[in-house]
């Protein structure tokens, strides 16, 4: 493999789901772009009128005819990709026919959809202004064939899938060609064959469904994500899929052997202008799906309305051509439902965590309503443990050290002061929970997540500081040492800093795509928690000052001793009550968040 090739592979595997740099395709080996015809050059295609023209030497053809196709420009171009497609279904269709080169020095044949020679591209990025090739009409040609070309003037200046002439099979009355270049006014509903939204009626009886939020009906609720599948056709030999959701760019589902992205058979409905294209692809790793054979998909229909993308297509249970990327449908798979942004038919990484069925489903098996979740269980445990650590054990443990040192002066617990024992146990528990919870996302992501923003950095700081605290506590000077105050301040300072960072990490954590709690509800709960905690702190700080003042005053005035101790007893009872209320309140807010983690 050439160094460029190695670099490309490396780049693709590193830049999960992003673009491939221009240098990669200077050799014109652009088979990956067969389906979308996008050059993957990092920029988006030009929308202005192009200086290039595609012509044929005839407007009609018969099977096995040879037709001259000419790409010319008033200015030079460095690269191109030329294909012929069924004019009726060009958005979804695969290539039609094959090409023959007239200038093999400058052009080369590509294999698209496993058809040798079904597309033509440049051989180097040398500038040219005209390319002539011959298109060979196949014996099973559709009635109308249209040529499409992507032309690259310079690597970030290119026109994608420019529509060329339509040629008609002899004996077929020509229809006025549909041109992609004339700008349409944006209609609210683009006409198409689907009459209206899908319905979840019949889910569990005649079809299997995946619904998010669970139990929703796309007919009633435009925010419903919907996937259904049902066997159909003579002898139930194919499966009809219906897919819809409130998405801008694309919605897709995948058949997967496991709950990880990778080695998945993917079906995508991608918005391209005012159309929807339906494509099959294969995801080999945590990477961009590779355009694969579009064959096997039939009865494709779609609809764009009410902010929803809908599509429906049928696929045979087993495909005859033994394509390893197209899985048999009479097996059990986890189902993924993902959506995201798309531009010019090019899809980007899914914008939030895919919905994943909780168990494997035999696609042709008995109809059922599948349970599903967007929160991977490992990430749920991570969130739950962190919240438990920092909303309950950590905050109560800190509270006790801050305000309860003078309380319970005459009792000991296992030979130590009560506050100290409780503080130590709670904080060790907090550190343990933090360490365990910290590791989980790394198991899940199998490394560092580049898409998680500041949250993981805050997490690392919290972990490091949490580990420093017990070490500092173990090597602290004795209480009567003159350096003890250094420890006291450092322990308090580091502890407070850790708590602040932990709270910030919680705010960011509940917005992570892998554990997206309902917003703004979850943020409000956390704000409530911060205010709850702050009000207790302020109250106890005031109490502490008043108490010290009062006890100083009573020392001065030599108050009656019994009265004093009763007063102290009463005060201690109130403070214990306050601690209990604080802990209960924290636990309540924690439970609210935990229950929403359980639900996603
Ligand atoms: C178009 O060009 C091809 C290839 O040169 C040739 O075989 C064919 O006869 C031409 N057709 C017409 C109508 O000129
Ligand atoms: C096809 O499947 C449906 C339900 O899945 C079943 O009711 C019907 O009998 C099947 N038809 C054939 C021909 O197998
Ligand atoms: C899936 O269901 C079909 C039809 O009910 C059955 O023929 C097939 O054996 C099942 N596959 C598995 C792996 O259970």
Image (cartoon, rainbow, N blue to C red):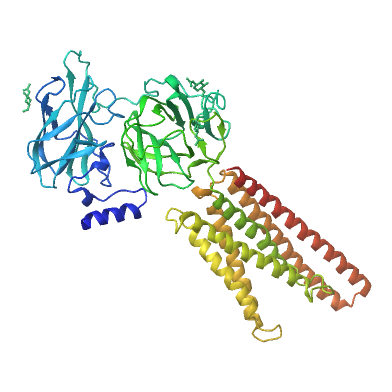
At x 47% / y 58%, what residue is drawn? 454
Instruction: Tell me the quarter of the picture where residue 5 sits.
Output: bottom left
Q: Position of residue 38 (x, y in %)?
A: 26, 40
Q: Is residue 269 left or right of residue 149?
A: right
| 155 or 80, nearer to the observer | 80
**What quarter of the picture does the C terminus occupy?**
top right
* In the depicted structure, whether residue 96 falls above or below residue 339: above
x, y percent for residue 128: 9, 42
In the rendering, at what x and y percent does residue 1 appear? Answer: 22, 55
Relative side of 143 to 421, left or right: left
Q: Which one is nearer the viewer's eye here, 216 or 42?
A: 216
Residue 560 visible in the displayed image: no
Residue at 35%, 25% in the rendered image:
298
- Count of picture labels: 0
Q: Is residue 346 left or right of residue 340?
A: left
Q: Residue at x 82, y 61 (%)?
A: 574
Q: Is residue 492 above or below residue 593?
A: below
Front position in the image: 116 or 395: 116
Q: Is residue 369 visible?
A: yes
Residue 162, quarter of picture:
top left
- Residues 281 and 523: in front is 281
């Amino acid at each position: 493999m050439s160094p460029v090739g190695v670099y490309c592979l490396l780049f693709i595997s590193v830049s999960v789901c992003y673009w491939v740099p221009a240098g990669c395709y200077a050799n014109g080996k652009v088979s990956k772009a067969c389906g979308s015809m996008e050059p993957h050059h990092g920029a988006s295609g030009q929308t202005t009128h192009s200086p290039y023209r595609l012509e044929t030497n005839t407007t009609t053809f018969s099977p096995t005819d040879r037709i001259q196709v000419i790409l010319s420009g008033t200015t030079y171009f460095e690269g191109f990709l030329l294909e012929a497609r069924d004019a009726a279904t060009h958005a979804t269709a695969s290539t039609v026919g094959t090409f023959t080169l007239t200038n093999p020095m400058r052009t080369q044949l590509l294999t698209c959809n496993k058809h040798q020679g079904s597309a033509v591209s440049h051989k180097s990025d040398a500038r040219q202004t005209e390319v002539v090739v011959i298109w060979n009409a196949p014996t099973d040609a559709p009635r109308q064939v249209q040529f499409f070309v992507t032309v690259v003037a310079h690597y970030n200046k290119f026109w994608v899938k420019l529509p060329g002439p339509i040629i008609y099979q002899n004996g077929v009355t020509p229809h006025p060609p549909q041109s992609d270049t004339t700008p349409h006014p944006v209609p609210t509903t683009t006409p198409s064959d689907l009459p209206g939204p899908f319905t979840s009626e019949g889910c569990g009886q005649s079809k299997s469904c995946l619904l998010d939020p669970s139990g929703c009906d796309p007919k009633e609720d435009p925010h419903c994500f919907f996937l259904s599948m049902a066997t159909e056709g003579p002898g139930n030999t194919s499966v009809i899929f219906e897919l819809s959701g409130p998405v801008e760019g694309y919605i897709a589902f995948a058949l997967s052997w496991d709950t990880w992205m990778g080695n998945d058979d993917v079906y995508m409905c991608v918005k391209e202008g005012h159309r929807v294209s339906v494509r099959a692809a294969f995801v080999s790793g945590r990477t961009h799906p590779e355009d694969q054979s579009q064959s096997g998909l039939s009865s494709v229909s779609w609809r764009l309305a009410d902010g929803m993308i809908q599509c429906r297509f049928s696929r045979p249970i087993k495909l005859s051509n033994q394509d390893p990327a197209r899985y048999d449908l009479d097996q059990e798979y986890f189902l993924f439902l993902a959506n995201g942004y798309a531009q010019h038919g090019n899809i980007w990484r899914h914008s939030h965590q895919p919905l994943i069925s909780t168990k494997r489903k035999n696609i042709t098996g008995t109809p059922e309503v599948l349970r599903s979740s967007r929160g991977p269980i490992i990430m749920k445990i991570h969130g739950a443990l962190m919240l438990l650590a920092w909303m309950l054990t950590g905050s109560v443990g800190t509270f006790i050290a801050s305000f309860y040192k003078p309380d319970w002066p005459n009792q000991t617990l296992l030979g130590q002061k009560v506050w100290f024992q409780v503080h130590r146990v709670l904080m060790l528990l907090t550190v343990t929970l933090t360490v365990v919870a910290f590791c989980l996302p790394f198991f899940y992501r199998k490394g560092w997540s580049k898409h998680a923003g500041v949250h993981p950095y805050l997490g690392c700081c919290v972990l490091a500081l949490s580990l420093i605290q017990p070490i500092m506590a173990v090597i602290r000077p004795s209480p009567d040492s003159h350096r003890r105050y250094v420890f006291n301040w450092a322990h308090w300072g580091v502890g407070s800093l850790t708590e602040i960072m932990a709270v910030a990490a919680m705010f960011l954590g509940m917005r992570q795509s892998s554990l997206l709690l309902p917003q703004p509800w979850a943020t409000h709960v956390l704000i409530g928690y911060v205010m709850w905690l702050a009000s207790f702190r302020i109250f106890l700080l005031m109490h502490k000052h008043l108490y010290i003042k009062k006890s100083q005053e009573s020392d001065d005035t030599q108050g009656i001793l019994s009265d004093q101790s009763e007063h102290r007893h009463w005060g201690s009872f109130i403070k214990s009550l306050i601690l209990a209320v604080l802990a209960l309140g924290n636990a309540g807010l924690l439970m609210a968040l935990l229950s929403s983690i359980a639900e996603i």
